[in-house]
Image (tube, rainbow, N blue to C red):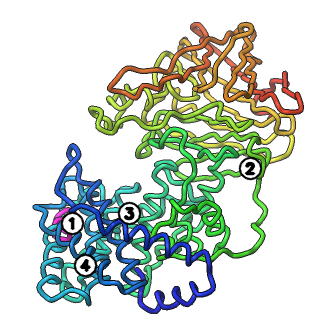
Amino acid sequence: MLKEDALRDLKRQAENDEVLQRFVREVCRQADNRLDDPKLLYEKRGPRLLHVSKSCVERIYDLGIAWRWTGEKKYAEKMKENLLAVCDFPDWNPSHFLDTAEMCHAVGIGYDWIYDYLDEKTRDRIRSSLVELGLKPGIERYKSGYKHFTYAYNWNQVCNGGLLIGALAVAESEPETAGFVVTHALQNLPTAIRSYGPDGVWAEGIGYWKYATSYTGFALTALETALGSDFGLSKIPGLSQTGYVPIYFTSPTGLLFSFADAGDFQKRKSAACMFWLARTFNNPHFSDSEHDLVGADDVSPFHILWYAPPSGKTPPARELDRLLRGDVETALFRSDWDDPEALFVGVKAGSNQAHHGHLDLGNFEMDALGVRWARDLGSDNYNLPEYWSYQEGGTRWTYYRLGSFSHNVPVLGGKNQNANALARLTHFQSNEAFPFAQVDLTDAYAAYAAKALRGVAMTDNRRAVLVQDEFEIESPCQVLWGMTTDATITLENPGLAHLSCKGKQLTARILSPAGAAFTVESAEQLPPQKRNEGVSRLVIRLPETKGPLTIAVLLSPQWKDGVSIKNVAVKPLEEW
C-alpha cells in the first residue's frame, strides 16, 4: 500500500509541506493514544464482529504509519500485540464475511509492514492465522458462489478487497492460495465498480459511498503496489467521476442529499479516498475539496497513504445544476455555491431494489436560509426483524423510515410504491430562470395509474421550488402528497401553510388542485423503530380520485430582502 520509495518521497515532501507535517503529527498523536488501547477481544455485538475488525484496521494503520515514519519500536510492538490478539480468535466470523474481510485487511497490512521487525516464529503464527481464519474461508465462499462477493454493492469491494490485501501479503509463501484469491477478486470487483457508471453515483446512497469507494481505493492501491497494475479496473467508466458526488451532493447548509440507509441530517465529512481519486485521475479538484474539510479530528492515516498536496489553483467553475446518471439517478440544483443560505433542491430516481434502498422514487430534499425544510429520515435499526426483506410485501417496507409514507413522495391507494419499481429522470434543464428535472414514476404506481410523473423546478430566478405531480388514474383511489420536515407548521387557510425553523420562514402553497387542503401529521413512531421525535408531515389528502390529476405545491422561502414568491403559472409538465 505504501512502498519504501513512496515513503521516502513523502518524507522529502514533508520537509516543505506544512499540511503534510500536520497530518503526520496528528496520526502519530493518534498512534501514541493507541499504545494504551486494551487488548482486542472476541466480543460480538449481536451476530457481528465487525466493530472489532474495524478497530483492528484503524489501530494497524495508525500504528503502522507512525512506525514507518519514525522507526520507533513502540509502535511496531503494539502492532504485533494487536495482530497476535486477533490471531488467537477462534474465527473472524465468516458467517458475516464482511467481518472476516476487514480483519484480513488489517492483518495483511500489519504482517506486511512489520515483517522485518518480527521473528520467524511470530511471522509464521500471523501468516498461518491469516490463511486459516481469513483466506481459506474466503476460498470456500468463492467456490460456493457466495452472492455477496458478486453483487454491485459495498460488500463486493470490502470482501474482495480485504481478501485481496491479505492474499498479496502472503503471496510469496502461499502462492496457490494467493493466486486463487487474486484471480477471483479480479473477476468480481468490476461488477461493483461498473455500478459507478456513468456519472459516479453510488446506488446505496451517500452514506455508503465513502465505505465502498475507500475499499475500491484499497484494492486498486494494493494491486498497483504489489503487482504493478490495477488490471484496468480504474478505467471502468464512472469511477473517475465519483469524486464529484460528495461535492455536488453537499447543500449550502453542509448537509448531504440523502437517500437509502443514510444517516439523518448527515453532513459531508472528510474522506481520504478523495485523495486517492485525485491522484488516480489527476483531478486536483477532488483533493482540494478534501483539504477544505480536513480538520485536526478528521486526519486519518489514509490522508498520508494517498497524500495529494493542495494544488494552489483556483477551483474550476462549478455548475449550479448537475444531472448524475446511474443505477440511481439524481438531479441537483442550487442558487449559489458560496452563500450558506442559498436555495438547494435535489430529486432522485432509480430502483427501489437498490441495496439499502427505500421506497422513495421521486423523493426530494430542499434547503434554504440555512435550513433543511424537506428532509429524508434515513435508516432505522438494522437489527429490526427482517430488515433486509426487499421483496414486494416484505417486512422491510412496514418500517416507517423505509416505506413510502415517511418520504417526500406521493402515495396512492394507501400503499407503498411498488418494491420492484424503476424510475428514470426523463428531462433535465439548466437555466437561470427555471431549471428543472422530471421523473417518470409510472412503474411505482402502476397498480392505480397509467401515468405518474413528477417535476421539480426552481422558479422565479431560483427564488422558490415548485413540485408538480401528474397522474392518469385508472383505478379510483385516495391520493396523498407528503413532505417530511422538522419545521413548526401553521395552517393559515386550507391551501396555505407557514413553516418556521431556526428563526427562518417558508410558505407552502397548493397551486393545484383547486380546493385541496393541507393537514399536519406527526412522523413520530413507537419503539423499537426510531422515534422521529418532533418531526412532522405536511400532507395533502385527496378523496377517491379517477382520471387526470395534477398536484402542484410551491415552496417559497422568506428571503432577507422580504421577497417570497406567492404564485407561479401551473403548466403541464410537457410544456416545461
Q: Is residue 559 above or below residue 205?
A: above
Instruction: Find numbered disc 2 in the image and state the secondary structure of the residue it sits on.
Output: strand
Task: Kindly identify the amino acid type of the residue bearing the numbered disc 3.
Answer: Gln
Q: Label 2: few (<14), some or many (≥20) within 10 Å?
A: many
Q: Is residue 110 above or below residue 470?
A: below
| Residue pointed to by mark 2 | 321
Q: Is residue 242 visible?
A: no
Q: Earlier in the sequence, mark 1 or mark 4?
A: 4
Task: Kindly identify the amino acid type of the residue bearing the numbered disc 2.
Answer: Asp
Q: Is residue 90 above or below residue 258?
A: below
Q: Nearer the viewer, residue 518 or 438?
A: 518
Q: CA distance from mark 1 to mark 4?
A: 29 Å
What is the total number of numbered labels drawn onto the structure image?
4
| Residue pointed to by mark 3 | 157
| Residue pointed to by mark 4 | 77
Task: Kindly identify the amino acid type of the residue bearing the numbered disc 4.
Answer: Glu
Q: Earlier in the sequence, mark 1 or mark 3?
A: 1
Q: Which residues are magenta?
A: 134-142
Between label 4 and label 3, give the one nearer the viewer.
Answer: 4
Q: Is residue 158 left or right of residue 339?
A: left
Instruction: Find numbered disc 3 in the image and state the secondary structure of the residue it sits on.
Output: helix
Q: Which mark is residue 18?
A: none
**Where does residue 500 sit, x and y in percent of width and height?**
69, 23
Q: CA distance from mark 1 to mark 3?
A: 14 Å
